[in-house]
Image (spheres, rainbow, N blue to C red):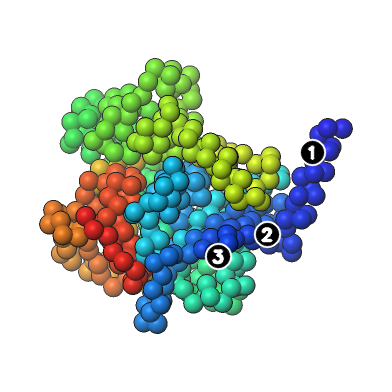
Amino acid sequence: MEKFCLLLVSLLFLSLLFNGGTARALRNQDGSEEWGYVEVRPKAHMFWWLYRSPYRVEDPAKPWPIILWLQGGPGASGVGIGNFEEVGPLDTNLKPRNSTWLRKADLLFVDNPVGTGYSFVEDTNLFVKTDEEAAKDLTTLLIKIFNRNEKLQKSPLYIVAESYGGKYAVTLGLSALRAIEAGNLKLKLGGVALGDSWISPEDFVFSWGPLLKDLSRLDDNGLQKSNSIAQKIKRQLEGGQFVESTESWSELETVIIRSSSVDFYNFLLDSGSDSTTISAMELGLSKRISMRRYSKYLSSLRGAPGGDGSDLDSLMNGVIKKKLKIIPEDVTWGKQSDLVFTNLEGDFMKPRIKEVDELLAKGVNVTVYNGQVDLICATKGTEAWMKKLKWEGVQNFLGKDRTVIHCGSDLTIKGYYRSYKNLHFYWILGAGHFVPTDQPCVAINMIGAITQSPGPGASS
């Protein structure tokens, strides 16, 4: 009887919240924030949160942009991680962030795919199984948000991704273009930016061993073990064994951790694997450890209790959930959804180079940026997959000289930049996997250049 009453309350809540497939959106008093749910498919609900910039500059020659931030994982929460730990207006202590990307654009965060963060499904069969399915849901979300708001339609949308989010970004870019061409989606696609993105898993796993050997983090024996598993992954991918290749990816990460104790998100740091982690690996739980490593990294840098992100969990399930008012009581926010990852493990190791080629061929501005000391999506691997592009301009791009990047009055070299037509690449020195956190000044100026924003820059 108790379960029936809870179900009835939940259904009543949903009937009040949703109307015609679109959630009732709420906003704060001054209209600078708006959020809500979109029912992207029956019983599949995606949460979004839009911030309007206080730095907005009205310039007809350069319309104020909107950035859609896509987190990685897969299954990591953009509404939580990207927002409060990387580029949003407030940090996890709810203090203003000087390096917020609101200086350059409005920010739209989503918990994608459904089942991530505040997004939820009423039936576990509704989790997405492919990047294309995730892109279709995101396109539906954009249709529901943009088609009803003429002001938003005037701003170009830039899809900016991190890590696995890069695979969502390129598939969404193509899906959104099709919807725009068909007249179903009313927005201007400004471009796609791929930050330390998991575009070609094969190229990344082959980069790990040689890179770590050159850094003295692996010896010849460790290099041989790494390359052997990478070769196995290559054979599995060629044979269409995508789930098996995901298992081998996890095996390779475990071998590298045991051999080098290197941090996958900054190869200058140690992984800090404790006896509990090692025991979990020995028990065959290495994939679960690999899945959760992404969502723990930023919290460990900030010295969160136990390095497990418990402070962000408390914030999102406490003060923020209370503020938002529309999160169902039985939805518990989490940094990383194991179920989302598990349902995508058949797509996890599939490359998305072809989609990048298609975007370039359609004239879409594509920017790639990479942190120098990232390992999981190492620059060495990124450069390798970019050389595989079939886009007609790739050889001219590769032949261009790089331009040095500084920040503000600091004459220290912060990175390098190369551009040809609609393909652009940033090498960000001193940054690991999370560029906006590691090099905030460079990141703000870079995103300003990508979006051609008239907003204020950053100083060193």
Q: Residue at x 24, y 52 (%)?
A: 428
Alpha carbon separation for disc pair 1 and 2? 21 Å
Q: Residues within 10 Å of mark 1 (few under 14, many from 20)?
A: few
Q: Position of residue 319 (x, y in %)?
A: 56, 43
- The residue indicated by pointer 3 is 31
- The residue indicated by pointer 1 is 6
Q: Position of residue 130 (x, y in %)?
A: 55, 51
Q: Amino acid at mark 2?
A: Ala
**Vertically, is 222 above or below 249?**
above
Q: Quadrant of residue 300?
A: top left
| Depth order, front residue of 40/335 | 335
- First along the sequence among labels 1 and 2: 1
- The residue indicated by pointer 2 is 23
**Vertically, is 375 above or below 14?**
above
Dot 2 lies on which element? Answer: strand
Q: Which mark is residue 256?
A: none
Q: Is residue 199 left or right of residue 23?
A: left
Residue, far front? 29
Q: Is residue 228 left or right of residue 314?
A: left
Alpha carbon separation for disc pair 1 and 3? 34 Å
Q: Amino acid at mark 1?
A: Leu
Q: Amino acid at mark 3?
A: Gly
